[in-house]
């Protein structure tokens, strides 16, 4: 499904959480434990230096999947492979190495930085802990990283609260780059920034990809950003991937009814402005997802089969896959 050999593979990965829901009118003691299936049997691959966008409404599980891929939470089932090596066969030390190769950029640049540290301390800490460069080279490497993300090394003396949102996000990117990762999982990295700053940070992501041969899993609800930066797109709905395609195929000829609904919400003229995902009807609760195809209560094409049978991803074009009974 990728043009180059995959650097990262996600195979049949699921992530469940336990949640408690008080029963109507019942005391807390009788509360019921329920399972939220945040991510269900997801398979994806990411080519070297590829940008794969992961899109969908908020709460669809895309951030959870990003955290599983970045090694921040363990999957309930399924397998992750980096450069062909399964996560499950690695020793604890090898897993730490694996995790170094897959770094995460967070949505809120302020919250992701330690407010008590200076920018220089934030950048130098991983260089020191992971022994990326000799001690004598740490300061020079920190300056180099700040320069690489478009910040003057003099910013090193400041603290996060003395920086703008865009500058903080640049520091977050520099910190992720300290360990020379091969993959960046970027979770809504520009959604908290002003539109003018968003463009600058997106340019930075594009430049770094060229310079460092780095791959991105780019999580976003913003189709304008996705259209601008991605090579391929995966569309997620209630924990499942419902369509994957090259960016051009997805935007010119979306196949899954959910993807079509997402794109219908984006005006064709003036697409340069960012647009948020909007679909009609209420999104079902992940605590009690609809049977069969999760999208059937909102789908204009739903049939009886859709209500009982889960559709799986099938080829609907040379580089396009959709999970929908319409294509069988
Ligand atoms: Fe709609 Fe059925 Fe396709 Fe689901 S499987 S998207 S309900 S047509």
Image: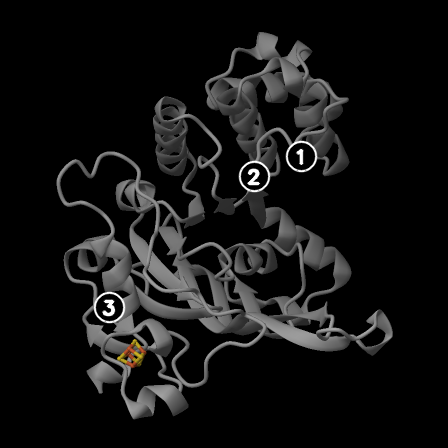
Examine the rendered structure and indicate whether residue 70 appears above or below residue 143. below
Q: Which residue is mark 2?
A: 180
The circle drawn on residue 132 is 1
Q: Nearer the viewer, mark 1 or mark 3?
A: 3
Do we see residue 54 in this rendering?
Answer: yes
Examine the rendered structure and indicate whether residue 250 appears above or below residue 154. below
Q: Is residue 117 left or right of residue 207?
A: right
User: Could you tell me if the residues under marks 2 and 1 are in contact, i.e. CB atoms within 8 Å?
Assistant: yes
Query: Looking at the image, which is closer to me, 270 or 283?
Result: 283
Q: Quadrant of the N terminus?
A: bottom left
State the separation of the CA atoms marked 3 and 2. Answer: 32 Å
Q: Give the percent coordinates (x, y) of residue 13.
A: 54, 72
Q: Is residue 8 left or right of residue 298?
A: right
Q: Give the percent coordinates (x, y) of residue 58.
A: 47, 54
State the separation of the CA atoms marked 2 and 1. Answer: 9 Å
- Whichever of labels 2 and 1 marks the residue nearer the N terminus, that label is 1
Q: Is residue 106 left or right of residue 118?
A: left
Describe the element under mark 1 as helix, strand or loop: loop
- Whichever of labels 1 and 3 marks the residue nearer the N terminus, that label is 1
Q: Quadrant of ligand 1?
A: bottom left
Q: Residue furthest front?
A: 25
- Whichever of labels 3 and 2 marks the residue nearer the N terminus, that label is 2
How many callouts does the rendering have? 3
Q: Quadrant of residue 33?
A: bottom right
Q: Give the percent coordinates (x, y) of residue 215.
A: 43, 47
State the separation of the CA atoms marked 1 and 3. Answer: 40 Å
The circle drawn on residue 320 is 3
Say whether mark 2 is within 8 Å of ligand 1: no
């Amino acid at each position: 499904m990728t043009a180059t050999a995959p650097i990262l593979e996600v195979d049949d990965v699921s992530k469940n959480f336990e949640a408690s829901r008080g029963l109507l009118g019942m005391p807390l003691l009788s509360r019921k434990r329920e399972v939220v299936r945040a991510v269900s049997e997801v398979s994806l691959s990411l080519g070297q230096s590829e940008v794969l966008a992961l899109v969908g409404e908020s709460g669809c599980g895309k951030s959870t999947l990003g955290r599983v891929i970045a090694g921040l939470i363990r999957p309930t089932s399924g397998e992750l492979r980096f450069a062909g090596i399964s996560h499950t066969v690695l020793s604890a030390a090898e897993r730490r190495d694996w995790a170094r190769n897959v770094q995460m950029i967070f949505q809120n640049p302020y919250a992701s930085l330690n407010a008590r540290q200076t920018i220089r301390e934030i950048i130098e800490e991983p260089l020191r802990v992971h022994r990326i460069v000799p001690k004598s080279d740490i300061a020079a490497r920190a300056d180099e990283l700040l320069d690489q993300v478009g910040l003057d090394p003099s910013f090193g003396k400041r603290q996060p609260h003395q920086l703008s949102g865009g500058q903080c996000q640049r520091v977050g990117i520099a910190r992720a780059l300290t360990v020379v990762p091969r993959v960046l999982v970027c979770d809504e990295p520009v959604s908290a920034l002003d539109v003018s700053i968003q463009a600058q940070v997106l340019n930075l992501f594009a430049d770094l990809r060229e310079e460092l041969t780095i791959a991105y899993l780019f999580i976003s609800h913003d189709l304008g950003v996705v259209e601008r930066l991605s090579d391929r797109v995966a569309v997620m709905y209630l924990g499942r991937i419902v369509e994957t395609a090259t960016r051009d195929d997805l935007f010119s000829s979306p196949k899954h009814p959910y993807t079509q609904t997402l794109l219908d919400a984006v005006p064709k003229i003036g697409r340069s402005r960012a647009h948020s995902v909007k679909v009609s009807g209420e999104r079902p609760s992940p605590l009690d997802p609809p049977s069969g195809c999760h999208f059937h209560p909102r789908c204009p094409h739903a049939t009886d089969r859709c209500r009982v049978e889960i559709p799986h991803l099938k080829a609907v074009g040379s580089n396009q896959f959709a999970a929908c009974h319409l294509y069988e």
